[in-house]
Image (spheres, rainbow, N blue to C red):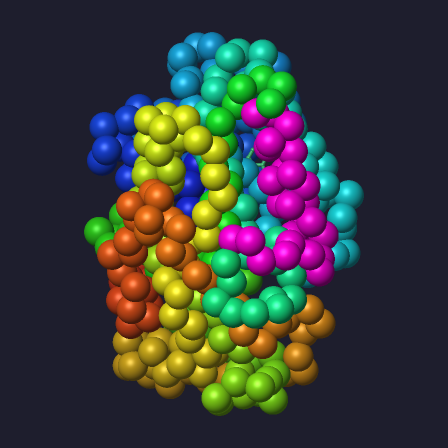
Amino acid sequence: MTGGAGYIGSHAAKALHAAGYRAVVYDDLSMGHRQAVRYGEFVQGDICDVHALRDVMRRHEVFAVMHFAAFLDVGESVREPVRYYRNNVGGALSVLEAMTAEAVRYFVFSSTCATYGEPIETPIVETHPQRPINSYGDTKLAVERALPHFERAYDIRSVALRYFNAAGADPDGEIGEDHSPEIHLIPRAIDAATGGDPLQVFGDDYPTPDGTCLRDYVHVTDLADAHVKALETIVEIGRSGVYNLGTGHPHSVREVIDSVARTVGRPVPWTLAPRRPGDPAVLYAAAHKAHAELHWTPRYPSLDAIVGTAWNWHRSHPKGYGDR
Ligand SMILES: NC(=O)c1ccc[n+]([C@@H]2O[C@H](COP(=O)([O-])OP(=O)(O)OC[C@H]3O[C@@H](n4cnc5c(N)ncnc54)[C@H](O)[C@@H]3O)[C@@H](O)[C@H]2O)c1
């Protein structure tokens, strides 16, 4: 699991462990946390290092790779495309190169709804045109587009999972979200409610019922489960695929603020900021394909359940993992 010390990867490691797999987490800790690796062995390394990757694959007899490692701050990707292309495209290429050299045949890729760009229609189906509007989305699409070539040439079977907005935390409270800087709405709203900086709401004049953007928040534990199902599907059926992972139910920024205020029991101070360029009004998934083919059904689809688990984690870990 590249990037297994990060937010989604650490939850996927727990899900893999529960399903009886032996995970090896490979992460350079540039954004992740050593303490987030509770399940599986840890190897510190860079995904751009093909030699080190091959060594880990050989030593641990790796049979499949889940590739979470990437940079994911959209704004930063616009300012620093070199870093994003090097890490997200170059890094993925190194991983695939090491896999071909070590005859590892299964690849589960963390893709994103950002590969769709401005939606033409919602809910978004997998066949929706992919026209990213920032370099982050483009780097992920570049990897998705490479995968059929790697399948033809090297027989690597892959699943690209296009996550919508990952949110929430492990319901057992063992692991959670700790990005720095934090770029995601729910932890930022929790921070604002508990004395941090007021939340900035980017635009309230969108063509939505309350004027704020609508997004599809999907529980991180549900994403983790989808990885196990995706892996089992490619191993058993041998068919590569692309799947949206979302609940199919969008929520506005104001609804999230209300849910956080209810859950925390305190108001969420917020200020209105201008719209951000490239923020579509509405983004949510049609996730029927994942339901039908991966037999995946979210266990925590309600916004209050997502916010509740996030609050549980932040309340017991006010400084996150405390290592930054
Ligand atoms: N969080 C979301 O809402 C979301 C939505 C869509 C897609 N994704 C994708 O999911 C994946 C995981 O996201 P996350 O939220 O868990 O992010 P994260 O930053 O918490 O985890 C990424 C991990 O990758 C590691 N990493 C980065 N560059 C590396 C390198 N060169 N070598 C080794 N390790 C490296 C980091 O240290 C970190 O532990 C990413 O690929 C992201 O693009 C996330």
Which residue is at a point 64% across and 45% down the rendered structure image? Answer: 141
> Residue 274 placed where, x, y %?
67, 82
As rendered, which of 28 and 87 lies closer to the eye?
87
Which residue is at a point 48% across and 89% down the rendered structure image? Answer: 210
Which residue is at a point 58% across and 76% down the rendered structure image? Answer: 281
> Residue 302 placed where, x, y %?
29, 68
Quarter of the image containing the N terminus?
Answer: top left
Locate residue 155 relative to residue 315 in the image: left or right. right
- Give yes or no for residue 146 being in the magenta stretch: yes
Using the rendered view, name the quadrant where residue 192 is placed: bottom left
> Residue 254 placed where, x, y %?
45, 83
Tell me, yes or no, if residue 298 can be seen here: yes
Which residue is at a point 72% across and 52% down the rendered structure image? Answer: 135
Task: Give the magenta part as a residue range.
Answer: 126-151
Locate residue 231 relative to residue 276 in the image: left or right. left
As rendered, which of 248 and 171 lies closer to the eye?
248
> Residue 35 placed where, x, y %?
38, 40
Determine the main secondary structure of the stretch shown in magenta.
helix
Q: Is residue 208 above or below residue 73?
A: below
